[in-house]
Image (spheres, grey):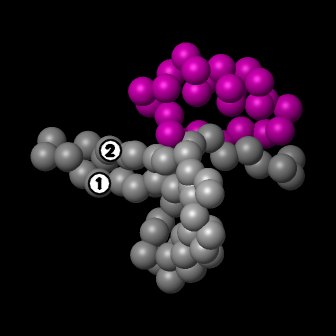
Amino acid sequence: MACVGSTSRLTSSGERKYMGVATYQEGDFQAVLDAIASGQIKPDSMITKKIQMHEVEEEGFKTLIQDKDNHVKILIEANP
């Protein structure tokens, strides 16, 4: 068993708080895809930066390590 997922909620101060897990159970991916397709989950708010493939090391990994308080998910755009 392995699980991947995340949830978010607003704190009393209006900040968004995310919590992720590193294990999943069979069927979880499909449930998440279904929730995204139905609009129940809107992943756009989780994407904190968009980069190109050639920027993965400098703008991806280093950003997540050095500025982890401000970044949740960095989207790598495969097409230039």
Circle 2 packing at 10 Å, graded few (<14), some (14-19), many (20+), is: few
Quick check: marks 1 and 2 in contact, CB under 8 Å? yes
- 74 lies above or below 26: above
User: Residue placed at 73% from the left, 21% from the top?
Assistant: 58
Instruction: Specify the amino acid type for callout 2.
Output: Lys
Quadrant in which residue 49 is drawn: top right
Q: Is residue 11 above or below residue 1?
A: above
State the image coordinates of residue 15 (x, y, percent, origin top left): 26, 43
Mark 1: secondary structure? strand
Q: Is residue 49 left or right of residue 68?
A: right
Q: Residue at x 68, y 30 (%)?
A: 60
In screen coordinates, is 38 left or right of 74?
left
Crowd rating for badge 1 (residues with CA inside 10 Å; few <14, some 14–19, many 20+): few
Q: Which residues are magenta?
A: 48-72
Residue on which the image places disc 2:
17
User: Can residue 47 be seen?
Assistant: no
Looking at numbered disc 1 in the image, what kind of residue is underneath it?
Arg
Residue bearing mark 1: 9
The local secondary structure at tag 2 comes to strand
In front here: 1 or 41? 1
Residue 38, percent across and down? 50, 83
Is residue 19 rendered to the left or right of residue 4? left
Nearer-the-camera pick, 44 or 69: 69
Return the x and y of residue 10 as percentages of the image width and height.
Answer: 24, 51
